[in-house]
Image (cartoon, grey):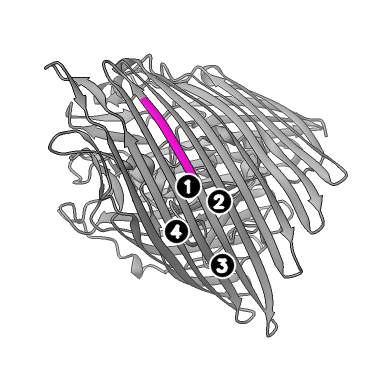
Amino acid sequence: MVRRTQPVALAAAFFGCAAFADDTGTVVVSATRFAESDPHIAANVSVITREDIQNTPATNVPDLLKAAAGIEVRPLYGAMGIDATIDLRGFGDTAGSNTLVLLDGQRLNPIDAGSISWSTIPMASIQRIEIIRGAGTVLYGDRASGGIINIVTDHSGQSAASLEALGGSYGYRGGDGHAAGSTGDTYLNLTAHYADTDGWRRNSRADQQTAGGRVGHSVSGGEIYSDFSAYKDSNGLPGSLLSNDYNTDPRRARTPFDSQQRDGYRIRPGASLKVSQSLTFDGEIGIEHENYSSDNVSFASVFDRQRTSVSATQRVRWVQDLGGRRNETVAGLDYYDGKVDATSIGSPSVIPQSAHQASAAWYAQNITEWSDRWFLTVGAREQHMNQHARQGAYIVNLGAGPQTVPSFDGSAVRSRAAYDLGLVFQGDGWRAFGKYGSLFRFANTDELFAFDPFTGNPVFAGDLLPQHGRIGELGASFAASKLSGRLSAYRMDLTDEIDFDGTTFANVNLPPTRRQGLEAEIDWTVIAGVKAHAAYAFIDATFQEGPNAGHEIPLVARNKASVQLTSNNGSLGSYTLAATYVGNRRYSGDFASAFGTLAGYTTVDLQGRWTVARWTVTARVINALDRRYAPFAGYSTFVNDHFYFPADARSLFVSAGYRFL
């Protein structure tokens, strides 16, 4: 039966560009790839400030995003969120390739289908998190279909020194350190993090270590700097659970001896220079390397991967006065080059794979102030992608003796362009705008590997087309003394969306899909010291054509809501209650909506925070109602049963921190 879509167009279609104020009361976002107090762009932008982070009951970076409208967080294992996926605006299984995550404006998404290495980001280093919904392809390119999450770390260099120790349920223990200072025109900012846990599920133990920071030197008109970090993490892989185990023994490990580990580093030297009164230059060179290995004892195999990426990103901002009105143009060049080498070792197979990807793009965006109330945004981008994949020959034994599977070697060159057009109208304490534009993404390197449907031999997926589409948005926001709100509506139509089809065991271009939705957020100062934040998102994500026309896209909740209430009582401490609701979803890979729905869930997290002199003590209760639920689940046709990745049970964490400066 084809489900009738809800008439989003009949809702009040308002769309706002709003950001929470930072600790100084100034709104600061990087939505133009330059930090500005109010960029006037036609985009739905919100900011999680340092104060918000301190008041959020979260033990990892992905969980900081749970209360934001339109975002669903799907962890697989444990309190560290090592394998967590962030889904912005309903992409389900392919969320990791359609939500672009940045660290200080630089990509964290790998060129393959691997997960983001959240271990590179100590929570103590985060100054703010910018969420830019449904916009970003023009400025950032590939993988920004759902939007952008930019994690901005502390670059102040102000004198500081602190230590924090943390302990919690299931053997959780950890520590954080932060030190910063300056001498003359040079400053240094350092952060270190360590955590270790036995895990709630059997074989879900995990550990995490990272250290990083920034060194900078002020020069005439700006600064030169270098960001750097090194990290290492490992964890057990207890695997998914079939229905009976999920219902009767959710702590069980189906793969009790499997594990994974990774280590890597990131270095990013750069410069920010004011060339003249009207011209600013920002540029960076980034180098990233990661080693990954998994020991899949349950499958008698080992997988090793090395990934290296180099980037060069330069841009200028030119601000002019045209007839007494501000005219701002941002233009830049992006170059990314990445290589992956992987080896899968089993018996009798040793399968070598490699992939290389090079991307070059130019972009430009102009914001014109027509009057005190009207602002026009026009932008365009063109990106070229050159990809190459190779798999060596290997030996298999399917019961009829050893056989050699031939190698393959393939390459493809793809190009896509994008544009956007937006108009902002603002009054005293309110703002409205409309936007229309295009977006795209290219296949990641893992999606280049496919199988011949007749022989079963591996082949290069050279016929996999880039995903592309259109997005339109309308909305408004307002801000009063104690109340602010944002309401937005959008429609996104995609052609050649890239996804994995479990019926053919291949990455394919899907028939046309559509995502349309409504997002609302309200912030209210109830009384002095008591603040409330509420968010709601409706997403209607469906196939528009083909054999699954009218069916829902898997793993996308039609309804998601959150409420967070914080009471700051001065010397008596601050207290937070955060509740999150995620509605029913179709199981992973179920394009035909044939295997029922994955149950929705509601979680409640609590936090108390007390500061006395230089000491700060924080207590958190995660999943306080001890709700059993699965953020991710699918259906296996091999065993004709559902499989689940259960979330952790109720957990308690207590930390104590001391500020030396």
Q: Earlier in the sequence, mark 2 or mark 3?
A: 3
Dot 4, how many residues are within 10 Å of its Cα: few (below 14), some (14-19), or many (20+)? many
- Read off the residue under disc 4: 383
Q: Amino acid at mark 1?
A: Ser
Residue 313 visible in this rendered orientation of the protein? yes
Name which quarter of the figure residue 594 lies in.
Answer: top left
As measured in the structure, the alpha-carbon distance from the residue carrying label 2 to the one carrying label 3 is 24 Å
Foreground: disc 4 or disc 1: 4
- Read off the residue under disc 1: 562
Question: Which secondary structure lies at badge 2?
Answer: strand
As measured in the structure, the alpha-carbon distance from the residue carrying label 4 to the one carrying label 3 is 22 Å
Find residue 226 and report its horizontal and vertical position in percent.
Answer: 69, 42
Task: Tell me which residue sits at (76%, 52%) in the image.
Answer: 223
Asked if labels 2 and 1 touch by Cβ distance under 8 angstroms, the answer is yes
- Read off the residue under disc 2: 533
Dot 2, how many residues are within 10 Å of its Cα: few (below 14), some (14-19), or many (20+)? some
Foreground: disc 1 or disc 3: 3
Mark identifier at residue 408? none
* Magenta stretch prevailing secondary structure: strand
Q: Amino acid at mark 4?
A: Gln
Q: Amino acid at mark 3?
A: Ile
Q: Earlier in the sequence, mark 4 or mark 2?
A: 4
Asked if labels 2 and 4 touch by Cβ distance under 8 angstroms, the answer is no
As measured in the structure, the alpha-carbon distance from the residue carrying label 1 to the one carrying label 2 is 8 Å
56 or 125: nearer the viewer: 125
Dot 3, how many residues are within 10 Å of its Cα: few (below 14), some (14-19), or many (20+)? many
Foreground: disc 4 or disc 2: 4
